[in-house]
Structures are given as structure tokens and as C-alpha cells.
Amino acid sequence: MQSPQTRYAQRGEVNIAYQVVGDRGLDLIIVPGFISHLDLQWTDLGYSRFLERLASFTRLIMYDKPGTGLSDPITHVPTLEERIADVRAVLDAVGSERAALLGFSEGGPTCVLFAATWPERTSALILYGSFARGRWTTDELRAIGVDPEKYDRVVSGFDDLLSHWGEGRLGRLIAPSATGDLQRRFWAIFERAGASPTMARALVEATLLADVTAVLPTVQAPTLVLHRAGDVFLIEGGRHLARGIPHARFVELAGEDHAFWAGDINPVIAEIEEFLTGVRTGPASDRLLATILFTDIVGSTRRASELGDRGWHELLDQHNARVRELLEQFGGRELDTAGDGFFASFEGPGAAVRCACAIRRSLREIDLDVRAGVHIGECEKIGEKLGGVAVHVGARIVALASGGEVLVSRTVRDLVVGSGLQFADRGTHRLRGIDEPWQLFAADDAVSPRARLGGPHEHLRTGDRALLHLARRAPALLRLGARLAGSNG
């Protein structure tokens, strides 16, 4: 989903950037935590999915606090009183008379104060990974069951973050499950775009000074407090927050990510949806059945050494052109290439196996030996890509294939029975990182002409081909049924 249009509300002379997405159900405004950036949040897959799910049952309102993201820069950190005025200005700008508030992290105290000050404009209160106060004495920490040394480590973690602002360490601190170079680059950009180093330090200091403990008993709105068990912002702070608000419901969630959009978002969304609507609809399906094909050139390092850089690149260009031509011919979709191998998907396993065999034959003509792996299973759709266990199985299968071999899983072999494709049993194997053993088969080029050409129904989905097979057999099945009925009559 592309980011929605950004508009501006005004609080005095300060411009506050906001966005609205969705038009179902009640109004829900996210009061952001430490830093935010309305446009960048849509570029992160987990973040955008979380927002899309919220917008599926609410009119979702988002904004950047002054001094952060797309809102005006400011020379001071506003007080909590100014922060609740920001919320009111945004709600006024979008024409919302009453809204549920979702306070993330340091946005929680702002939500608490707003709900207590403007009860007629607060339909519900959700506090995620939040707290009532930032700084605690040793005795206060021990009173709520927190080891003071553990609390000190949390505070020192922010000292390290601020000393290296703009390098991406925020992700390591609040979203430890989001790893990899792409995520590190996202967090580095997010830090620099979210706030200047000076503003970031001031925001941390303001967070430590925040304290709405005395206000908690005055909150009248129905309240849900969510906290992940391993959150860097200690769960004891969330429990203390919930105990102080009359009739608040506290839910402990599994995980260690402080960022609500990192890790497993489904339990977080489910709790919010049920709290606001009374039902849990579950996530829209991002999964589909797909056939996975991996190819890999055998001995690529040796051939590159023999041919030299120029000769090897010319041969690779021929390899890529032939593979892409055959993918198109057999209805495959290229998902990725690693230079000397391809990752593609197909609607049916027969097409994938035939394509793999055709690739093997074609590349032999230019003296290239390839191996291929084919598997079919449920995949997760990630943008235009596919992921999930089925993809990992396919990658492990091609790694076990010998030079010139098209290796397939038993699932593939079973689904193409009657297609004319022939296979040789290659035994049962343990695939690295996969618990259960897999029986594998090698596809044989010695197939019937109909199978090699693909046949008139090659591009039908697997389920459609099964129905077609049953339809062809229907007369014989009816005759068999009549004989059985006659013998019993």
C-alpha cells in the first residue's frame, strides 16, 4: 500500500503532519512514541502491514509530534499539556469528535492525560509498551518488582543510542527480531529522518521526566494495556500502569520487541480489534499455494576461472536469456536471481518440472551444467516475492541435486501422476533446518511427447487439472457403479 496523503494541522504557529487511512468503524488515533516519520513507516513491511490491519476496522489517524518526522522542527520539547493539545488539533483537523487513543511507548502518558482531561472525546484507551513514569528511585523499582540494575541497563542503552545517533542502533534496541542489512539501513534512515541528534536527546530526557501516576485513577475510558514479556521497557512498568487505571485490562504478549510492528503482529492486532469491536476477524490471507523452482549452475567458479571475466559474463548473459525465455514459455514467474541461478514460481508442479528439464537441455547446448530443485507448498506473499517454509524446502532440495539433475519433492511427484512425467527415487533425506525427512525424486527427460510439450491443459491450476482428470474418468466410474449396484440388487 502506498502512503496516504500528508496534510497539516496547526497548534498555534506549529504545523503538525498527519495522515488518515481507512473509513470503517470508530476513529483511532496513534499517539507515537520516541520518534516517527509518516512517510518512512510505509516503506517497512511490518510497519505497513500493521497499519493496514488497523485501518481494516477503524478510521486510522496518524501524526508526527512537533520536532519529529514531517512536522515542524521546534527548539524545545513540549510539555505534556502541549502534547495533548497536539492530539486535539489533529482530531479537530480530521473532524473527529470522539476517538480511541493508541499510545505507543512514551505516547502512553500523553494518552492518559488526554483521556483524563477530555473524557468526552475519548472512546477508549490502548496503551502498548508504555509506562506511567520514566524515572524511578531504587525503592520504587523494588516495590514494583524491578531489579534496579536491570533498569539502569535500560537507561544506559539509550545513552549508547544517542552517542551513535543515525547509525541504526534504535532497531537493535526496540526491534531485536528485525535483523539483516535491509533492516539496519531502514533504522539508520529512520533515526536521521525522525529527529535531529539534539532533539533525540531532549526527547529521551523528557521521557525520563514524565510522570502521570497521579492522573491514572481519574481515567474513565475503557482501557487495554498491552506489553510484550521481553520488552526492553520492562513489563513491570506496564503492570503498574494497568493497576493504576480503574478496570484496566492487562494483557501480556509473547516476544521481546518494543516496536508494535515488529515480530508477530497478529496477537497485538487481535487484542486491539476485539477490544474496539468485540470480534476477532484474523489477518487477511497473505498465503497461497505455489510451486517453487530453484536452478543453479554447477561448477560456476571453475568455469569462470577458465573463461575469464569477459567470457564468463558473456556465457552468463546467454544462460539468463535462455532461462527467462523458458520461464515465459512454461508460465513461470521470475522472483529472484543470484547471478548463476534462478528462483521462480509456477501455478502448477507439472509446468515447473517440464521447465526445469527444458532448462537443463537448453543449457547443455552451450556447455553449461545446471541442477534444479522443485517443490510445491504454502508460501507467504511478501510484496511481489514469496517466502516461508516451502521456499526454504525448495532451496534445500536444489542444494542436494547432482550436476544435471532435476530433483523434486514427493509432493510434486504425487501431484503430477498421470502427466507422463517420469521419476527415479533418490531416497529419503534430512533437509538442513527442516525437522521432518523428505523423500526426493529425480525427473527423467524420457517423457511422453504430450508431457514434454505440456499438453492442452498445462496452465490449469492443480485443482482444476484434478477435476479434469475425474471428469475424464466419469464414464468408467459410472459403469463400475452400475455393475456394483447390479451385483447387490
Image: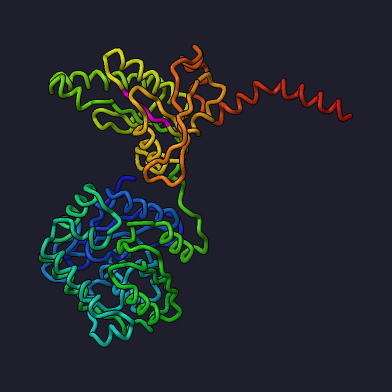
Q: Is residue 337 above or below residue 247?
A: above
Residue drawn at x 23%, y 26% is: 300
Give 404 or 421, whichever is nearer the viewer: 404
Image quadrant where residue 55 sits: bottom left
- Tell me: residue 3, above or below residue 345: below
Q: Which one is nearer the viewer's eye here, 432 or 133?
A: 432
Q: Position of residue 468 (x, y in %)?
A: 60, 24
Image coordinates for residue 4, horizontal then vertical, percent: 31, 49
Q: Residue 98 sits in which quadrant?
A: bottom left
State whether residue 326 appears in this view. yes
Farthest residue toward the front? 427
Q: Main secondary structure of the magenta part?
A: strand
Q: Is residue 479 left or right of residue 27?
A: right
Q: How is the image coloured?
A: rainbow
Q: Is residue 123 visible?
A: no
Task: Tell me: 430 left or right of 184.
Answer: right
Picture residue at 23% right of the left edge, 29% below the top: 339
Q: Could you say where residue 483 lies in the image, as x and y percent from the top left?
A: 81, 23
Quarter the C terminus occupies: top right
Residue at the spot 29% in from the left edge and 80% down from the top edge? 212
Magenta stretch?
370-374
Which residue occupies the extreme right position in the image? 489
At a point 18% along the width and 74% down the height, the residue shown is 206
Q: Position of residue 143 (x, y in %)?
A: 32, 86
* Depth check, front residue: 401 or 185: 401
Q: Is residue 151 above or below residue 280?
A: below
Q: Nearer the viewer, residue 76 or 136?
A: 136
